[in-house]
Image (cartoon, grey):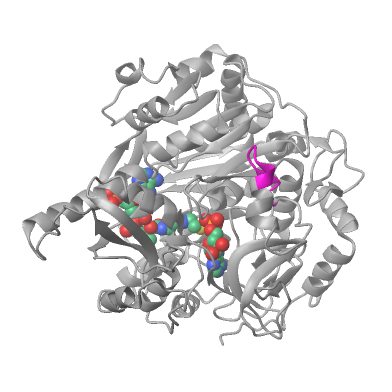
Amino acid sequence: MATHDASTTPTAGAYAEAHARSLSDPDGFWLEAAQAIDWTTPPTSAVDDSDAPLYRWFPDGVMNTAYNCLDRHVAAGRGDAVALVHDSAMTGEVTEYTYAQLTEKVAAVAGALAAEGVGKGDRVLVYLPMIAEAPIAMLACARLGAVHSVVFGGFAPKELAARIDDAAPDVVLTCSGGIEPRRRVEYLPAVAEALEEAGHTVRTVLVHHRDGFQTALADVADRGGAAWKDWGEAVDAAEPAAPVDVKATDPLYVLYTSGTTGKPKGVVRDNGGHAVALRWTMENIYDVGPGEVMFTASDVGWVVGHSYIVYAPLLAGATTVLYEGKPVGTPDAGAFWRVISQHGVKSFFTAPTALRAIRRADPDGELKDQYDISCLKTLYAAGERLDPETQKWAEGLLQIPVVDHWWQTETGWAIAANPVGLELLPVKTGSASVPSPGYDLVVLDGMGEPVEAGVEGNIAVRLPMPPGTLQSLWGDDQRFIDSYLSAFEGHYATGDSGIVDDDGYVFVLGRTDDVINVSGHRLSTGVLEAALATHPAVAECCVIGVADDFKGQRPSGYVVLKSGVAAPDPGSQEETRLFDELTAAVRRGVGPVADFRDVAIVDALPKTRSGKILRKTMRQMADGEEYTVPSTIEDASVLEDLKSLLSPRG
Ligand code: COA
Ligand code: AMP
């Protein structure tokens, strides 16, 4: 195992002490952390268990998240420090915003939202690419105590509509479009289609104008029953808005993520617990403080973007880099190193798939050598397991600690990490390091009994979870309890399986449900199957996530055609046409982000006698893993027939 010498650690033992204290005295630990936040009314207690298994943090605290991200730094005399750097590899532009400038911009957009009648608790849907308006929109909502729901630009209108119906926003904040390497993505037709499909009626759509897109505001202005308005004009006409006091327990945002079923789960984050936890992680996990630069190469539509592009760096008074571009091809595999060098990045956070993309294009790091990246102290990876090969490659290339850390949309911050700021622990290749302070992590067997060190099981967290983790699912406490808190009483079930070794290091091995991970994007096979099933020739289908050297997993579909629909001859034009239509159905239903390309026509799907498709067995076969045919199988010959189709490909 690759290790880094931890003997120079200034505060050896700090992690063990912090973790132990966070569990034995959570109130003391988190009230102390809460002192790093400015409160209108400071909290007098930390965890509120009066409604267990639903927990609330800092029940009597009052504050504003946007104030803590912006105004407080200006008030402290740091108005001229750079808060946000927008670096677009797509347009070649770099724009810096100081804390004073960002505060002004956020107050102005908050004013425009207030003029549209948005207030505390109202929902605002944000559908924006990686431009400065995205964090500005999020912070403007936070300023008013409104609840934002950010939707990733790679989702199709149908997915956008599902989120509109669940969160019921009054206003949508969007722009002309996003820039992908091979195409321009027109946002306005997608928003219009989503509004028409949704049952809920949105009052106003504010559109930020971006040059270079075909659809103008006037082209969609009569669609979807909303008033479509120009963002700039709305801002100019409004008075800037001041931060509004909210309870620590009031919701800051809802962020939808894939679950096992087709209906996305709206993860609800509070204000106070979130601010306290994220602020704590900046110092203790990422080792970034005021005046230092963090670059998180994710998207604001994902939780990593929410936490470490927007909120955490600003809560800490640091500089955050918002990068519009890809790891490779914009223009080349040196793009991240260029950004790191140009903006003096200290902590860099990306997805393993992005590192694999760079490694594939520039294995010897020749492009990296063109830049001075001596400013970079630590590389953090998350979104999927950092495979040992890639971790070793990155360590060799950068000669700095390369830290895998494990988290989920639900938790909002790392469940397990190497707490670099607190104490750099030895790095174990293949492990996400140790449970973060606040997480009482256990590995349980199927009966809910703890397993021994080194034995694989379900990873769970003893309740209560620390501050900053999900409060509930939007409008559905029962679904929250059923989905996460019922499998193992008194625990949050992570949905991941793994091992904790004798040293307490966590090895996350994979999901225990039908959630898959494609290029660091979390997707539900149920949603992909529902989209595939919309094709008129499909009788039934299933989608599994097959191991992929580059993307982590790739979705692979198996389709049974309706009786009366003849299976096209292999290699024929009809077959190509059918495959194109099937992949297009998924692209239309879920979005390009699903990256759905593999589909096969089969005679039947293997099932249990009760009709459950044997997805896990199929995946194990496709991944070349050992598998046992369940005794409950309805017809073993169906699985036998699929053997050659499911044999592992490189
Ligand atoms: N808006 C619209 N479309 C988007 C999009 C967005 N925000 N993001 C991706 N897409 C589209 C792409 O244009 C592409 O469409 P195409 O089929 O028309 O070409 C499709 O979705 C797949 O794109 P992508 O996932 O980017 O695949 P890729 O092969 O082009 O690039 C990687 C591969 C590894 C470079 C890329 O997936 C990546 O950077 N992943 C990291 C993801 C990440 O940071 N996740 C956060 C976890 S911390
Ligand atoms: P998301 O909610 O999109 O962040 O996806 C969360 C899921 O991604 C987790 O439940 C894991 O399955 C996977 N994941 C994220 N980070 C890691 C990691 N460092 N190691 C292993 N799996 C990870």
| First to last magenta residue range | 469-478
- Position of residue 54 relative to residue 505, above or below, is above
Residue at 58% x, 55% y is: 294
Q: Magenta stretch: residue 517 in it?
A: no
* Left or right, residue 592 beside residue 373: left
Residue at 53% x, 12% y is: 237
* Left or right, residue 22 beside residue 163: right
Image quadrant assignment for residue 377: bottom right
Q: Position of residue 578 (x, y in %)?
A: 17, 53
Q: Position of residue 15 (x, y in %)?
A: 77, 71
Q: Is residue 376 visible?
A: no
Quadrant of the displayed image that contains ligand 2 = bottom right
Of residues 104 and 541, the one drawn nearer to the viewer in this rendering: 541
Main SS of the magenta part reads loop
- Position of residue 199 relative to residue 500, above or below, is above
Quarter of the picture holding the N terminus: bottom right
Q: Is residue 201 visible?
A: yes
Quarter of the picture holding the C terminus: bottom left
Q: Position of residue 226 (x, y in %)?
A: 44, 17
Q: Position of residue 267 (x, y in %)?
A: 61, 46
- Position of residue 249 relative to residue 340, above or below, is above
Image quadrant assignment for residue 554: bottom left
Of residues 399 and 410, the one drawn nearer to the viewer in this rendering: 410
